[in-house]
Image (cartoon, helix red, strand yellow):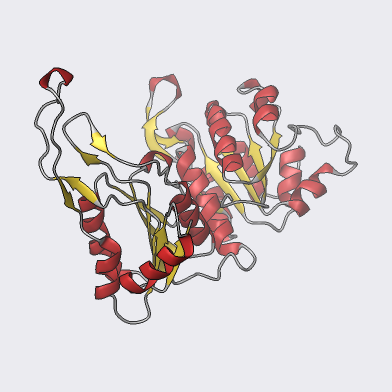
Amino acid sequence: MGALDGRRVVLGVTGGIAAYKAVEVCRRLVDAGAHVAPVLTSGALRFVGRATFDALASEPVQVSLWDGDHPIPHTRLGQGADLILICPATARLLADYRNGRSGDLLTATLLATRAPVVVCPAMHTEMWEQPAVIDNVATLAERGVTVVGPVDGHLAGGDTGAGRLAEPADVVDAVLGILAADGPAPAGDMAGLTVLITAGGTREPIGPVRYIGNRSTGKQGHALAVEAASRGAKVHCVTTRPDTAPDMVGVAVTPVETAEEMARAVADRAADADIVLMAAAVADFRPADVAPQKIKKAEGIPEVRLVPTTDILAELGRQRTGDQVLVGFAAETSDLLENAAAKLVAKGVDLIVAN
């Protein structure tokens, strides 16, 4: 399940060199579950190809008021959108939108919607600092339009300064934040709650190369993080798989590797959590000694002495106070219900997810 499942986003792309970054924005929105309807201006087509967005988006690119099967495309797009995102937004687009001018499909769609609108300005520093542009952006912001960026950085032509398009991840974070706050129930039924989630399998080093681990991918814990954040919770995810962790508003990620690192990270954050979901596959044992160099086969079969790791779930069960909800997970190969029931009592938790 994606954070934007069922949400319709109109992605407007205007004619600036930063238009190529809209491709990455489109991909990220689709990956989050959004239905993305791309609307490109004729200027945008000078920088990016129609075929690229046709391949990535949820429906074909639309450019003209007069093309397509729908007789009134701007009302279909504007009235059906949960959010309209303009990325990049040129100085001309900002001026047209501020003044209510409708000269193409994109500006007509903006005037035909009651959905939230996000604009991501991108232009050279001199243009961005023009009083007219500043006034247009300020007026749009006063009317409730969300403005993301621009930022300082490298610009076209080798220049450096303000006016660079915000990074795609930050643009999508803004969309996620707006739709999470604006969405229908149950999207906001966890607002005000703090959720601590662990994910992935720990790796206990034998030496600098080899380790004792398990097959956990972290997908279950990460999916729980996305769901909780999408419903309004503030989420902290402690994970051994930061490479696949959620990249979205409302989810803070702490990368760890070993059981002891996870125990420390959880202990630092548990007191502030209303709900703790221990979805990680934490090793029960670790090598007592870690070899300083790679263990060679020629040296013979090594003796690896194991010692117990910290029982994170049991520690949480003993130390929690108040109304904190504590959920454990039990992966079993036999006697699933019996073992899960025993763990429920032994660890002092509220729920056990058994599989």
Residue closest to the far top = 298
Find the residue positioned furthest to the front. 335
Q: Nearer the viewer, residue 190 or 238?
A: 238
As rendered, which of 287 and 70 lies closer to the eye? Answer: 287
Residue occupying the point 75% across, 50% down: 78
User: Between 254 and 350, which is closer to the camera in this rendering?
Assistant: 350
Relative side of 228 to 257, left or right = right
Residue appearing at x 42%, y 70% in the figure = 341
**Where's residue 286, x and y in %?**
19, 46
Q: Is residue 141 visible?
A: yes
Residue 80: horizontal and vertical position, in percent?
Answer: 76, 52
Pinpoint residue 118: horizontal percent, then vertical percent.
58, 49
**Residue 258 vertical position relative to residue 88 in the rendered view, above or below:** below
Side of 37 where 224 appears, left or right:
left
Residue at image location 43% in from the left, 41% down from the top: 244
How many numbered dots are placed on residues in this image? 0
Q: Position of residue 17 (x, y in %)?
A: 54, 26
Q: In the figure, residue 158 lies in which quadrant?
A: top left
Using the image, determine if residue 162 lies above or below residue 1. Answer: above
Question: Is residue 112 shown to the viewer in this render?
Answer: no
> In front here: 312 or 116?
312
User: In percent of the image, x 12 and y 45: which residue is there?
Assistant: 288
| Residue 203 relative to residue 121: left or right | left
